[in-house]
Image (spheres, rainbow, N blue to C red):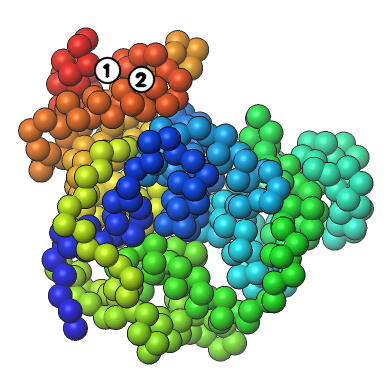
């Protein structure tokens, strides 16, 4: 069994995620393809305090890029990426669609996944409406397929009957997401009008074959990972169960085939594996901010084990109980997370607001200057003219000085 230090494991993980890829002067679709190949998926989330979640991992790896690249990749034919429940709701390469069919079959057998059931009598009618009028939003069909007043069960989502049926049809693969409106509403259309024909014609693997391929992809995206890390990346069942596919079976197969090798990582008590294509760079020259929904940040235990960085998103914490702020991004400098910064894009004022900035105990001298340069770059990408630093945090004074405030 090989041995890795925490530093080596961290550098391997960052290289696997694309943080050592050679920068392109102007990020292109080639850059986009390379980046998505590294991350595997781009989590989608509606929070727009700074920038939508799926745009940020691309920025963190590619630098300032034309966000139209993502729109073209996800909405123009032939599509490169499509939304599905891959990690959670996420944009994924279209070639993953056949690997998700076992998940679609599960949702069909369970009649969904949210705890409420779509009205089965409406399904053929809603599907016909999508066929005739798609792409459509749930709002377009709401009045036509309403069966009564909305209820406020199930977390208060207050979904219309049309929305419930469309979501179910999406989960089972009968419709797909063709794009989103400027208000972030989902546009549904027939799957055959969204996915490339070659993807639709691809054979359906068995559930275990699909899980094994997803674990293989997770291992490439992680570089070095525990079993829990590998299972979590695509939200797979870890342990074997009668009649169920599992990540553990996949790991054993990939070890037997020589694609994964057991490795001991300093400070990790969990069994860990190294992908055969993982690269250990001599250095990582990153300087960027990481979204709370970045693959590096997803699994909090892994984040802490690799970076000695304890992180919790505080959006749902009452304001008076927050430690660092509402929307806090880790700041990656080199191969360490050296700070965290609370950010908000004030688009009406044309300013990137920094209510708080906090250094980690190991933050090197010059962290404020490096963070200031990154905030200036981020503001420019977001089309904001100014960076306004608040009073909270031990980096705030240094940031203002570095920004000439």
Q: Which quarter of the picture shows residue 121?
A: bottom right
For the residue pair 326 and 49, the one nearer the viewer reads as 49
Q: Measured along the vertical axis of the image, is residue 366 above or below residue 152?
A: above
Quadrant of the rendering where the C terminus is positioned? top left
Residue drawn at x 60%, y 70% as measured from the top left: 99
Q: Is residue 305 visible?
A: no
For the view shown, which residue lies furthest in the left direction? Answer: 365
Judge the density around disc 2: few (<14), some (14-19), many (≥20) Cα neighbours within 10 Å: many
For the residue pair 15 and 26, the one nearer the viewer reads as 26
- Marks 1 and 2, how far apart in space? 8 Å
Q: Measured along the vertical axis of the image, is residue 320 above or below residue 125?
A: above
Q: Horizontal placement of 15 versus 308: left or right?
A: right
| Residue 389: % across, % down | 27, 17
What residue does disc 1 label?
390
What residue does disc 2 label?
353
Asked whether the beta carbons under mark 1 and mark 2 sit within 8 Å of each other, the answer is yes
**Among numbered discs 1 and 2, the one appearing first in the sequence:** 2
Residue drawn at x 44%, y 13% as measured from the top left: 350
Q: Horizontal placement of 107 versus 388: left or right?
A: right
Q: Which quarter of the picture shows residue 142?
A: top right
For the residue pair 78 and 379, the one nearer the viewer reads as 78
Q: Is residue 136 visible?
A: yes
């Amino acid at each position: 069994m090989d041995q890795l230090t925490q530093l080596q494991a961290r550098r391997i993980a960052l290289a696997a995620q694309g943080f050592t890829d050679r920068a392109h002067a102007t990020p292109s679709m080639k850059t986009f393809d390379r980046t998505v190949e590294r991350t595997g998926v781009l989590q989608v989330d509606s929070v727009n305090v700074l920038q939508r979640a799926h745009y940020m991992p691309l920025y963190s790896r590619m630098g300032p890029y034309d966000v139209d690249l993502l729109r073209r990749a996800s909405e123009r034919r032939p599509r490169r990426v499509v939304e599905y429940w891959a990690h959670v709701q996420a944009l994924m390469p279209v070639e993953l669609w056949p690997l998700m069919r076992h998940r679609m079959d599960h949702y069909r057998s369970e009649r969904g996944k949210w705890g409420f059931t779509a009205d089965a009598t409406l399904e053929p009618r809603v599907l016909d409406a999508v066929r005739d009028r798609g792409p459509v939003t749930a709002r377009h069909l709401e009045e036509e397929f309403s069966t009564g007043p909305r209820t406020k069960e199930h977390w208060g989502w207050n979904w219309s009957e049309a929305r419930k049926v469309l979501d179910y049809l999406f989960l089972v693969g009968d419709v797909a997401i063709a794009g989103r409106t400027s208000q972030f509403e989902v546009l549904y259309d027939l799957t055959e009008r969204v996915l490339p024909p070659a993807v639709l014609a691809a054979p359906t693997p068995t559930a275990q074959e699909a899980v094994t391929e997803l674990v293989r992809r997770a291992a490439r995206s992680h570089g070095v990972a525990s079993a829990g890390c590998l299972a979590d990346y695509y939200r797979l069942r870890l342990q074997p169960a009668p009649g169920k596919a599992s990540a553990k079976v996949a790991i054993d197969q990939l070890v037997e085939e020589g694609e994964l090798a057991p490795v001991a990582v300093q400070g990790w008590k969990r069994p860990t594996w190294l992908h055969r294509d993982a690269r250990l760079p001599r250095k990582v020259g990153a300087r960027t901010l990481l979204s709370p929904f970045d693959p590096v940040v997803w699994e909090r235990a892994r984040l802490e084990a690799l970076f000695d960085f304890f992180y919790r998103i505080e959006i749902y914490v009452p304001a008076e109980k927050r430690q660092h702020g509402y929307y806090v991004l880790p700041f990656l400098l080199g191969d360490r997370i050296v700070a965290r910064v609370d950010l908000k894009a004030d688009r009406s004022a044309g300013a990137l607001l920094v209510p708080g900035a906090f250094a980690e105990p190991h933050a090197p001298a010059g962290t404020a200057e490096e963070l200031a340069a990154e905030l200036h770059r981020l503001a420019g990408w977001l089309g904001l003219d100014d960076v306004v630093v608040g009073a909270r945090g031990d980096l705030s004074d240094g940031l203002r000085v570095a920004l000439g405030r």
